[in-house]
Image (spheres, grey):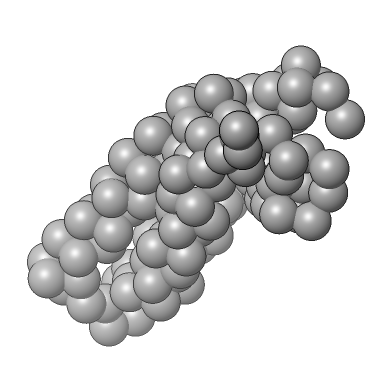
Amino acid sequence: MSKAAFRTLVILELLIAIISLVFELFFPNTLVEEVNFQILEVAATGGETGEMLENIVVSASSLLYLVAFVGLLMFRNWGRILYVASYIIILPSYYINGLWLYSETATLFNDHAFMLGGFIVALIYFSPVKDHFEPSKG
């Protein structure tokens, strides 16, 4: 795979994730919003501490992802390490505040972004693309 094709995949993943966020924020599904409201009323959440912890985790992961994004585009070894780290750091956020539903369209784009992210991880560690990240020997 060429460097340009790889960069296209990385940019495509970011764009798909942004599209997912846009659909979730600006085109909400009223039924999903109603169910989420019911979940908030019924479920015992982590309270403000849980929300603050989730915000810290999501912010740290997002910052790492953006730095890793630049590193991947520049084919830097630290970029691929941070890319995987950003996915690992976001994992606790799924458990901090419990169940939350997203609209169908946002979920569709989000799932595609995650699948493409997995494909990118496979490329940067297990394909000839990894050779672009290795330090040059000379």
Query: Is 116 in front, or is 54?
Result: 116
Question: Picture quarter containing residue 40?
Answer: bottom left
Q: Residue at x 34, y 80 (%)?
A: 43
Q: Residue at x 22, y 77 (%)?
A: 46
The answer to whether any part of residue 137 appears in the image is yes
Q: Residue at x 32, y 40 (%)?
A: 63
Relative to 7, does residue 91 appear above or below in the rendering? below
* Left-right relation of 62 to 75: left
Question: Picture quarter containing residue 44?
Answer: bottom left
Can you say which quadrant of the picture contains the C terminus? top right
* Left-right relation of 105 to 128: left
Residue sitting at the far left: 48
How many circles with numbers are drawn on the protein? 0
Relative to 1, does residue 36 appear above or below in the rendering? below
Q: Position of residue 39 (x, y in %)?
A: 41, 71
Q: Position of residue 111 (x, y in %)?
A: 71, 50
Query: Is 134 in front, or is 8?
Result: 134
Q: Residue at x 79, y 56 (%)?
A: 126
Residue sitting at the far bottom: 44
Q: Position of residue 7 (x, y in %)?
A: 69, 23
* Left-right relation of 56 to 137: left
Query: Is 128 in front, or is 13?
Result: 128
Residue sitting at the far top: 4
